[in-house]
Amino acid sequence: MLGATLMSVGIAATLGTFGSAGRTTLRAQQQQVAVQRAQAEVDRLATLPYGALALTAPPVTSADLRHPGSRVEGTSLRITADLAEPFVMSPSADQDASVNPGPETFAVGSGGATITGKIYRYVTWRDETCANSLCEGGQDTKRLTVAATVDPSPGAEPRAPVWLATLVTDPDDAPAGSQAVPDGGPGGGEPVKAQSFYLYDTPCGEGERRPPASAHETRDTASAAPDADSASACEHPDPKKQPDLMGRTAPPGDNSTPLHEYSSDLAGSYDGGLAMIGRGSSCSSAYSSAEATNPDGPGKWSVHAWSTAPFTQTFHLNGLVTVSLFTSAVGGATGNGKLCATLVDRGTVDGLPSDRVLGSAVYDLASWPTTVRRVTFSFSLPEEENLLPGRRLMVALHLRAESANDIVLVYDHPLYPSLLEVATATPL
């Protein structure tokens, strides 16, 4: 009798463990299905004609904070705590609105293993805050946002929706890297062109791009120090202590060109490029050389810098800056991302950097891409600027601590031509 009792207790405990494991597995499957459905819907919407990206009806609202409709505020969608964007309700003159806001029911699986849920779609106008003559008004690009919810299992609590988003630009406008910004921007009536600088995985001291040959550890590209031996500069004798190079030529090659890791010292699942960890709560273009390898603060794993070669003539910046990057969250994780971009006018005196910060902006995206996609954002410098011969233009990217996950930037590859673009009346 005692043996039977002990056996019964053991079996009950084992079945309880199996039940708990089963519930955990089911919730993981539901989360994966929600992410996959949301990503597939974002990808589908991105293939529609730009003029047809408009809602066919106003989205539903809800007072339930776990319902996607809780973010609908009249004719706008709440993107972040301090940002709401108006819905796109009118298609172009030659298109019909093609985006049904839903909810639309989906089912994945069969029989008792079927996972059901709903898809919600939103299209909003995004104001890129461009320079006046280059990008007027508040309807510069469109944001495609998708929320996916999963119906809870019997007795389970409803779970928060999965949110994914991407930005799309009008193909009839000048895309980043096209060298076709309209004439007549700020600058005394001089024609304004778009000058592109592609990001390379080459130390800037080499002067010209060389094809990436293998994976390597993260370089110390943005150390600041009172002495030339410790500060990152193109003139530093150690290539690992130089900013990376950016130049005017897109990376050559094709889809067979290998993609290497530029941060092999960081753990995480990504196919190649530079992994970054979020540290620091304000935009930084540099970090103390003593803190370069401090994993708990801004350092070489959260701030990365690229520099042009020295200018041979005066280079005039008209004010508009565009950063266009291929990126994803490491491991395909979902969540927000907060990336700073800072432009710097750099010179050196006896090998020690002499910097002048030109302007900075924060790109705050509620749902960072879970697979490698292009994200593009623009901002304006406070003033037009001249960079004198012998000076360099530098850009520093900094992943802020408010980001939910580590991210990877993919560049210096023919399939992923990430770049910095500036409006100028003196193109190179």
Image: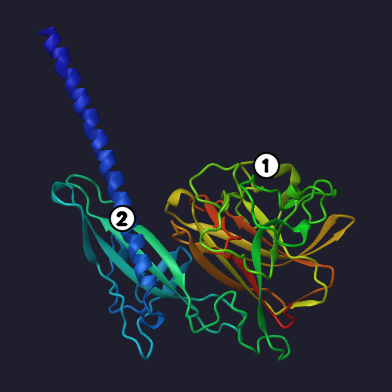
Q: What amino acid does circle 2 point to?
A: Ala
Position of the C terminus by quadrant: bottom right
Q: Quadrant of residue 383?
A: bottom right
Q: Residue at x 17, y 18 (%)?
A: 9
- Left or right: 56, with 172 as reference point: left
User: For mark 1, what is the residue?
Assistant: 293
Q: Residue at x 51, y 61 (%)?
A: 255
The vertical placement of 62 against 275, above or below, is below
Circle 2 packing at 10 Å, graded few (<14), some (14-19), many (20+), is: many
- Left or right: 116, with 79 as reference point: left
| Image location of residue 94, percent across then percent down | 36, 90
Work out whether residue 161 can be spotted.
no
Of the numbered discs 2 and 1, the one sitting upstream in the chain is: 2
Viewer-nearest residue: 178 or 256: 256
Helix, strand or loop for disc 1: loop
User: For mark 2, what is the residue?
Assistant: 34
| Image location of residue 67, percent across then percent down | 29, 60
The vertical placement of 373 against 110, above or below, is below
Total of numbered circles in the picture? 2
Q: Residue at x 68, y 48 (%)?
A: 219
| Image location of residue 96, percent across then percent down | 31, 85
Marks 2 and 1 close (CB-CB < 8 Å): no
| Image location of residue 81, percent across then percent down | 46, 63
Position of the N terminus by quadrant: top left
The vertical placement of 136 against 411, above or below, is below
Q: What amino acid does circle 1 point to?
A: Thr
Q: Which mark is residue 353?
A: none
Work out whether residue 206 can be spotted.
yes
Helix, strand or loop for disc 2: helix
- Left or right: 425, with 254 as reference point: right
